[in-house]
Amino acid sequence: MKRRELLGLMGGAGLGWSVLPGAARAAQPAKDAGTQRVVIVGGAWAGLSAARELRLRAPELDVLVIDREPVLRALPLSTPWLVDRTPERMPRLDRAALAAQLGYRFVAADVQRIDRAQRNVVTAQGGPYAYDWLLLATGVSYDYGAWFGADTRAAQAAQTLYPAGFVASELDVLKARLQSFTGGNLLINVPAPPNRCPPAPYERAMLMAWWLKSRRIKGRVTVLDAGGGMPRFTRLFAERYPDHIDFQPHTTIRAVDPFARTVSTDDGDLHFDHAMLLPPLRASAVVEQAGLLGHDPQGQPTRWAGVDPLRLRAPLDERVFLAGDLLDTVSPLFGHYPKTAHMATRLGVAAAQQIAARSRSGGAHATEPPLALPHSVCHVWLDADPAEQLRIETQYRLRGDGLITQAVGQHDNPQPRGEDLQWGLGLYADALGVK
């Protein structure tokens, strides 16, 4: 591959990445009138992993990825970057260039509506885009209504002034605001699960405390946790950062006043000088618009996409598949899959395998492809100086009664040598087809 092609794929970052040879040999999309079309809504870990898998497994399919952002900015290793502990280590990828190299299509557009009856995806910029198979991989959205109701002005102020930093577009703003923080109460909240990578808020609290301590900023990190915390981190907070972290478990934010800089809890109001406000999470609005939300045991709609956990198919539509963070509960034994980058890639691959098999052998009544349960790995920092990390591995097994079980293992990694970065770059190579 020529150097200018690499620079195009990297969005001008100038790093020597290339498309893996196996992916580069994938056939280009067929163009005859009888070609079946797969539309993937969402071009992050799950969607791009599915697109690559479809090109390798079913090159006869026409695959289109739609995402509002033209560039992918990866989040798994962002917190150490926020506090200047490391540079930004995950490269940014130009989605259109990646699609051109791997043989699928990409459109930068904001999806407004899905018409399942007509099998169309409608965007603000054009379309409709017809599909034979639809994969939704739209990730999570913030549910500010839980705090602000219909007050969109307050919700916008909270997201602008006090971003949580769990969406890529918020990172630069958050870092700039942290650089101007001179002291006081720095508030971090952990909403009730399911959340993004479960250890991530605690890792962030620890690194923020280290940042305050190392810079001798007269401040304190207040952690309002709707749950009980993670034992490994709560011990670390008490032992290593007793003067810099105030951990308050079982404390849920009920309301926020971003103008007065206060949050309301069941125990009263709390003032903050700066905050990373993470509201409850939910699937994107288009999942609800398409009528694909799950339902709880009482028949009420949930905040997440209902799914057949073994086949990743929407229960109400045999042509719609789902992957990534948007999924509803998958087992009564543990609830949701962890909403991590690694998990999203595995779910994207599994959904692509289901689509490929059905597209080749009779659609909804096709011979079932082999079921492949996902697994997940994530790396989190336990301390910054000296560096100490924790690797969390989650495995899944199908029991004889048809329920999925979860087993979680934790492995200490004192004095790490970049294992987290190698893991992240491995996701780029294995899931997205670049190295």
Image (cartoon, helix red, strand yellow):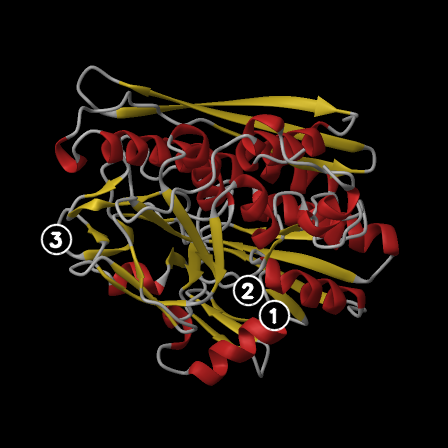
Alpha carbons under labels 3 and 2: distance apart: 31 Å
Q: Between 386 and 329, which is closer to the camera in this rendering?
A: 329
Q: Is residue 318 left or right of residue 101?
A: left
- Mark 1 and mark 3 lie on one chain; the one further toward the N terminus is 1
Task: Identify residue for label 2.
Answer: 277
Dot 1 surroundings within 10 Å: few (below 14), some, or many (20 or more)?
many
Amino acid on which disc 2 is placed: Leu
Q: Is the C-beta separation of discs 1 and 3 under 8 Å? A: no
- Mark 2 and mark 1 lie on one chain; the one further toward the N terminus is 1
SS for dot 2: loop
Residue 299: give its label.
3
The image position of residue 29, as x and y in percent, is: 42, 42
Dot 3 surroundings within 10 Å: few (below 14), some, or many (20 or more)?
few
Q: Between 393 and 68, which is closer to the camera in this rendering?
A: 68
Residue 242 visible here: no
Residue 211: give its label.
none
Give the residue displayed 34% in from the left and 23% down from the top: 372
Residue 274 visible here: yes
- Mark 3 and mark 2 lie on one chain; the one further toward the N terminus is 2
Amino acid on which disc 3 is placed: Gly
Q: Residue furthest top?
A: 400
Q: Is residue 395 left or right of residue 416?
A: left
The quadrant holding residue 412 is top right
The image position of residue 260, as x and y in percent, is: 58, 82
The image position of residue 191, as x and y in percent, is: 45, 55
Task: Identify residue for label 1.
Answer: 162
The image position of residue 288, as x and y in percent, is: 26, 62
Residue 232, relative to residue 69: is it above or below? above
Amino acid on which disc 1 is placed: Tyr
